[in-house]
């Protein structure tokens, strides 16, 4: 069964409650013929780490938010929770979500792991929006997944704004990305789903020869690749990084802001 605006597939996206980046970047990244519906992961826990784990504890029950909408793939637009869960719990949770929903399931970390492996990356650089506590957990996660974290750059800033990550600017992400110039890397991954990343990738699709990915780009690519297996290919992924199908939308969005 298809719906009017998604003849090639409908993606069900779960977004952390205060995140202001996922829906705009998904709208920019989603290619013609595909569409997404969004649900919010809610938590009253006090700290970021507690909220991240609470979001995951709500699954698979949270799938009920989509009722009987004919979603073809589930995407949890969250990366930080994976660092706290650890690889075994993460894999078990994603398998349970897929089993309960009857469709493939992915999250920010699993999609990024798949993309890095697709590119044959071993030595990676990370651009982080997190504070030092979550950064430590992050490095351990990527190491456990078989990557060497060879360089890290931080975009994190203490802020009185509504959220220190979601209030980051695209310029802050780009400035952190440029810190990795001169490093010997196979790929660069911009972490999280709350830091705006697409303008940085559009301007810097490669840093020191290494392709630049973000968790949001990986989520959109991997969700679409579940629906179109021809996209699950190194050349197709490189085309996503180059932005042929999403740059024009990003440019129109940028013009509207001016």
Image (cartoon, rainbow, N blue to C red):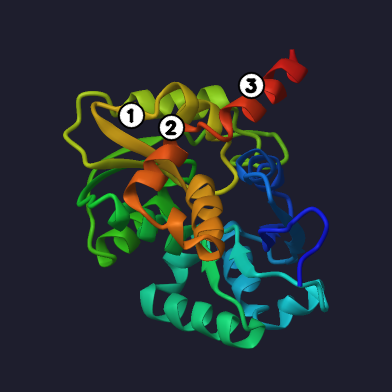
Front-lying residue, 106 or 226:
226
Q: Is residue 222 left or right of residue 36?
A: left
Q: CA distance from mark 1 to mark 3?
A: 19 Å
Q: In the rendered view of the protein, which quadrant contains the C terminus?
A: top right
> Could you tell me which residue is drawn at 65 percent across and 79 percent down?
59
Q: Which mark is residue 206?
A: 1
In the foreground, 100 or 164? 100
According to the picture, the residue beneath numbered tag 2 turns out to be: 242
Question: Circle 3 sits on which residue?
Answer: 251
112 versus 210 height, above or below: below
Q: Position of residue 186 (x, y in %)?
A: 22, 42
Q: Quadrant of residue 97?
A: bottom right
Quarter of the image for the N terminus: give it. Answer: bottom right
Residue visible at 62% across and 44% down?
31
Q: Earlier in the sequence, mark 1 or mark 2?
A: 1
Which residue corresponds to the image point at 29% horizontal and 57% vertical from the top-left? 117
Farthest residue to the top: give it. Answer: 258
Task: Give coordinates of residue 202: x percent, y percent.
Answer: 49, 26
């Amino acid at each position: 069964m298809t719906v009017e605006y998604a003849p090639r597939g409908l993606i069900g996206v779960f977004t952390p409650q205060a995140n202001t980046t996922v829906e705009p970047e998904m709208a920019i990244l989603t290619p013609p013929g595909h569409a997404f519906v969004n649900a919010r992961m809610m938590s009253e826990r006090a700290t970021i780490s507690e909220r991240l784990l609470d979001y995951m504890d709500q699954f698979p029950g949270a799938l009920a938010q989509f009722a009987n909408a004919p979603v073809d793939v589930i995407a949890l637009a969250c990366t930080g929770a994976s660092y706290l869960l650890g690889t075994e719990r993460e894999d078990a949770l994603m398998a349970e979500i897929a089993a309960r929903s009857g469709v493939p399931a992915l999250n920010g970390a699993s999609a990024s792991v798949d993309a890095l492996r697709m590119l044959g990356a071993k030595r990676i650089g990370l651009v982080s929006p997190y504070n030092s506590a979550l950064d430590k957990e992050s490095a351990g996660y990527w190491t456990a997944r078989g990557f060497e974290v060879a360089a890290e750059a931080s975009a994190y800033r203490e802020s009185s704004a509504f959220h220190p990550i979601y209030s980051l600017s695209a310029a802050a992400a780009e400035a952190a990305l440029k810190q990795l110039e001169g490093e010997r890397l196979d790929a660069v991954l911009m972490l999280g789903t709350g830091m705006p990343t697409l303008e940085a990738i559009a301007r810097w699709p490669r840093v020191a020869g290494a392709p630049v990915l973000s968790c949001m780009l990986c989520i959109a690519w991997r969700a679409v690749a579940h629906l179109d297996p021809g996209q699950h290919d190194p050349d197709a992924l490189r085309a996503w990084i180059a932005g042929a199908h999403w740059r024009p939308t990003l440019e129109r969005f940028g013009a509207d802001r001016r």
